Image (tube, rainbow, N blue to C red):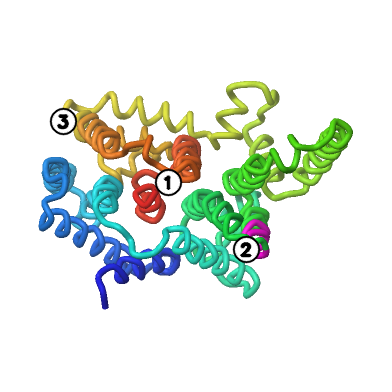
Amino acid sequence: MKKEYIIIIFLLLGPFLDVASFLGTSISIMIRGLFLANAIVYLIINKKDFKILLLLLLFGTFYLTYQLFYLHFNIISSLSAVLKFLYLPISILYFKNYILPIKKQKIFSIILFTYVGIYLLSYILGIGAEAYLETDGKSGFKGLFSSINEFSGIVVCLLPIITTYLKEQKKFILLIVSIILSFLCSLLIGTKVLMGGVLFTILYLLWQEKDKLFCSKSKKVKVEIIIFSLLIIVVGCFLFTKTRTYQNMMIQQDFFQVEHIISLDFVNRIIYNDRLTFLQDNFNYFKNQNIIQILFGIGLENYNIKMVEIDIFDILFRYGLVGLILFIGSISYLINFQKIEKINKVSLILLILISLTSGHVLFYPAVCIYIALL
């Protein structure tokens, strides 16, 4: 089998690797680790961006030693932490120098339909797990995936690219099916990110066709479209109050006793799910560590303090100032934003926004692989 198709098979295995992770097997980290090893060997043999690669590998080696002998973490958690740190920058290096033999949109389409298919099938068959504990009071179904944040991030990232591609290919039935299935997932999962991402995709598709659907119309038709749009917004707002997403938000508002919608407390407790509090706790813990831990982090699986789940801060606290500078610096150096296709920029921006709100993007291999592909 040609090497090119081995990489495609690896990408298509993504949803199944996440199911394997949910089932508690180690096959997911093993296969993703093999991909990373293959990428490193490929870059070394072909002498691609060797200076950046060497810098990343030196830090990875040091960080593994640091976690094992200074922070006294076990070998599995230490290797996992290194894998997560290196995955995005080395994957960007790899796909920057490696051309896939078929269109990425086709691969993305299969991956999206596999993810939503597994999710919806698990709900229909009644297998999988709930997203929240009974004591939380919230409702949501995560199916056969360990993280609803990662699942949501992947669907939100892929959906604009795939729907745009299907529209260009005039495959309108598949386009409508992809949106409906993704929206059904958002209703069942009960999170803001996925529902917001699906709604954004719909609005983005309409914006792409604004000249045909609105600008070229007569004034009378434009007024009718505006009135109809306002009606849809009103009805949509009413229907939103019936969703799990809204009900979960209200449960959280009652739990934290948030009184005012326009307040920092509402943003923190309801929009950010109390992440700003976790940020303050992490900062207070981090600043009181010694200079070595400030430079190289408190360790990814340090359970003395809950992770912020805002990626940029988790990288700072878990990998230290040196890790943050190297991570952001290497990625910024490698990415030429001007050369990225417009629709890919949209998905990339969505992923960055998700990383700044619900996290689980920049150093989570299941999601960050798509940044590298974009």
**Percent x, y of residue 91:** 28, 51
Q: Is residue 250 magenta?
A: no
Look at mark 2 in the image and give the residue it sits on: 171
Residue 292 image label = 3
Q: 202 or 18, which lies in front?
A: 202
In the foreground, 86 or 5:
5
Describe residue 2's horizontal placement relative to residue 238 as left or right: left
Amino acid type, residue under disc 2 in the picture = Lys
Which region shows up in magenta?
173-180
Relative image position of residue 254 (x, y in whole percent): 69, 36
Between marks 3 and 2 in the image, the one whose residue lies nearer the viewer: 2
What residue sits 66% from the left and 35% below the top? 253
- Residue 237: x and y in percent read 78, 39
The answer to whether mark 1 and mark 2 are in CB contact below 8 A is no
> Residue at the spot x=69%, y=26% of the render?
261
- Sequence order check: which comes first, mark 1 or mark 3? 3
Q: Earlier in the sequence, mark 3 or mark 2?
A: 2
Magenta stretch secondary structure, dominant = helix
| Amino acid type shown at disc 1 | His
Dot 1 crowding, Cα within 10 Å, few <14, some 14–19, many 20+: many
Whichever of callouts 1 and 2 sits on the residue coming sooner in the sequence is: 2
- The vertical placement of 193 against 218, above or below, is below
What residue is pinned by disc 1? Answer: 360
For the N terminus, give its image quadrant. bottom left
Q: Nearer the viewer, residue 316 or 14?
A: 14
**Residue 179 covered by magenta stretch:** yes
Label 3 sits on what residue type? Ile
Give the image quarter of residue 294.
Answer: top left
Q: Residues within 10 Å of mark 3 (few under 14, many from 20)?
A: few
x%, y% of residue 5? 32, 71
